[in-house]
Image (cartoon, coloured by chain):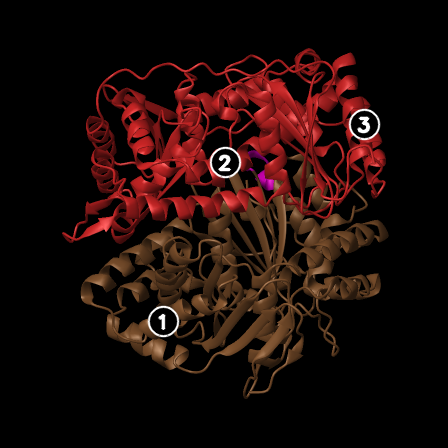
Chain colours: A red, B brown
Amino acid sequence: MNLPGSGLVRGAAFGLTALLALCGAAPPQAPRYPQASLTDLGSAKLVGESDAGATISGVQVFLAAGLDREPAAGNGVAGLVAECVLRTPVTAATGERLPLRDAIQARGGSVTYTVDGRSTHYYLEGRPGNVASLVALFGRALAAPDFSPPTVRAARAALTARIDELESSPLSSAIEMFKRSYYATGVGRPALGTAASVANVSSRDMTDFFQHAYRRAGLSASAVGGLSPELGRAIKALASVLPEGPVEPVVERAKPIPANAPRVVAHRDIGAPWVVVGFAAPSPASRDFGAMLVLESMLSEAFERSSATTLGLVEKSVGAFYLYDSTPASLIVYVNGTEVDPTLALRELLVVSRSLAQRPLTAATLSRFKTTAEGQFLTDSVSLSDRSYLLGAFASWGLGADAMNAALDALEQTTPADVQRVAKQYLQRYIVTLVLPRQVSPGD
Amino acid sequence: MRAVLRAGLALVGFAALALPAAAAAGSLPNLGPEVTVGRLAAGGTYVVRPLSGPPVAAIELWYRAPSTGFGSTPTPGLARLAAQVVAASKPIVGASLGKTVADLGGRLAITVYGDSLSISATVPAAQARDVLKAMTTAYFAPVATDEGYRYALRDVAQEAFIASFDPETVARDALFAELFSGGPQHYPTLGPANDVSAISLADVRSFATRAFRSQNAVLVVSGAVDPSIGSAAVAGRAQSDDRAEAPANPVLAPSHAPVTKTFSEPAVGYGWVGPPIGDERAATAMDFIADYLFRPDAGYVSRQIDDAFPEALISGQFITLRDPGVMYVVYSGKQIDGLKRIVDEGIAKVQQPMSAAAFASALEGFKYHLLSDLQTASQMADNFGWYSIEGNPEYAPGANGEKGPYFKAADSLTPEFVASVAVKYLGKAPAVASLAPGKDKAVQQ
């Protein structure tokens, strides 16, 4: 592959190499999130971070209804069920029958959902004084979700539009391709399905999935912002509308990454190529978590072109993100061919990865990147939605209520030897995915 | 993951306006018991609003300055480029502001409006004082180096290039050009990439020296910070004249003819002038209308378009400005006639009083959206910065919480009053900008 580039990559990578040998001052003492609490509600648990004086509450309700529980031929059913839940008529405060999202809106709140490997999680937001009533409305929809043909038709149209939007992004496409190659279980599928798979999901499929996956034992919740005492009772009542019965454990695994760096190629109507290099990565429960956060930070900046302002994903020449909320976790490094020569960037990335495995960082370099990694961790999750998700996800993985502060602790305790060990263990095998303009072939 | 375009006029929920830095000479506004307001050492104002929650802080500097520069020849993009050059320039001692924030894992953004701009950083709270000091050092005695200029030119030209593919930005710029025949509001905040590249370092230095000074600044800090953090600001240059820049005088066009511009996909924008920020009740009514019709995922029009044309784009907002405010709507998609029908029906609908029940529900939703849009440190800082720079800081929705003037104005709304405001401002023919493939001409009515 011989593609045009700016030539900035090589200089920037050498800049990183130089940085590995130099670097500065010790970081100030790390800040901490508010102390979280864990409430046992019987079958469900509620983890919460209360912000004094907050005028809004954010509640995340996790249901063990993610990609890992979709049937083999039913990719997209989790998203369709969630779309139908939002459209299920419930009796609003006025006595009217309204779709759930409208009834919640009429009470001064909002509801959204996300599908990931392990769960479908619904985010409800409202004022502290009424968020419990929003949870109650949500419970009415879960008690009798509407999978009637008109509702399914509307749900399918909305979901297909979201899928089209995701598929139009070359970066999203490349990440999806990596996940399909890497994961052996449902988490490797597109989160919302594809237009074709969603078209094939029937009302019966949705009913089956709902009955199978929406179980009391599979519900957990997290809340941040202004918390009221009524919230715990509302979550408990919510759980009670779901049927009892066991939630079958699912096996979450990835395929071993071969040593020969497999390539996956797709063509899209885009102007320049995008490259994604995917690595295996440790879970947040691992002792290697802090070291991988440091590596993510280093690789994010390895080739950056020194913009004064923070660049968005599509503006960056090279970026990295650590998908620690997938199970197993993975690390993605991407190259934007609009900005740099992907071949050169890829080569430099692999040189840096090997270098990190071969020798430990200096204390000063580690200190500098720990500071950066900590800042990125903190500034990545500032909204109530993002915070409640991370808090609840960490808790659901058995990391305890104070897992976000534990993550900061793990970063602080990371040593040069940790970083070297983790680079050696995780960064030496990878899958390369290429999204190319339709007229370009790999090797050109 | 979402791709973020840094739009020139992207606003904070509901548009907003300002604490005259010239309040330096007068009394300080009362923004409530949770807000500390003071004067910067060499002039200008600071506002500190601590929040509990995640250990992060937002630090923002707001300036009154025309996006097109102070000269007689308008130079679109000059303010944006100048702010970027200063952020990218390494001073004699220490790192550039951009590198300082990046090394801390923080985020730095610069947003330019017609007659103002903001520099905002979100960083770990433990480093808030250091960043505040670095930011005020950079922007109270600006340094513009050759290297900083080179990097900034590249980045701002790229931003202009990306913005040229955003239908909302293109349509909104065309609407403002129609509504205003003069003043910085007539011009895009970011000109074409080629025009940006033609701006000289000398022009940048001249602009930065006049605009970026303590006396012209409103410093806003929010998040997990101590109320005394305002004292960490450096003094900056002493000036014999401690006045802030005067607001530019927008020149309203006496009439407007529809304009068609070339774009890759069909889009249409409508624009109307609205009440000034001083008319708080009417301005709040316009915010309510924009929220009711166009709030993403929840508005009456937005929801209908999501259901009927899920691939389409719809955006509408009232921008609270000193005088006048501006309401705009942009819709884009293949079924442009269907979109127009829904938008037009929505605009007509709000000119009739809503039923009591529908109004109560919409008002509850509106107040929730206001509070939701103030949940993070950067949202809170944006809120105070905007209303301060537009001259009415006490009217900021974050000022005095739900007991403040904004929420009082919201509580005073009635279906009849909202409809009357809609008739007064939206009952007139709007300025219209149409984007279409293969056309680029002014069309006479």
Circle 2: residue type? Ser
| Range covered by the magenta-colored residues | B124-129
Residue A49 lies left or right of residue A359; in this view the side is: left
Residue A293 lies left or right of residue A273; in this view the side is: left
Taking the magenta stretch, the answer to whether it contains residue B128 is: yes
What residue sits 45% from the left and 82% below the top?
Answer: B429
What residue sits 24% from the left and 64% below the top?
Answer: B359
Confirm whether circles 2 and 1 share one chain: no
Where does the C terminus of chain A fall, quadrant-wise? Answer: top right
Q: Which residue is the site of mark 3?
A: A347
Give the answer, above or below, for where A124 lies relative to B205: above
Q: Where does residue B289 sit, x and y in percent of width and height?
A: 36, 67
Where does the N terminus of chain A fall, quadrant-wise? Answer: top right
Residue A128 lies left or right of residue B242; in this view the side is: left
Residue A381 bears which disc, if any? 2
Let me know if residue A52 appears in the view. Answer: no
Q: Which residue is the site of mark 1?
A: B345
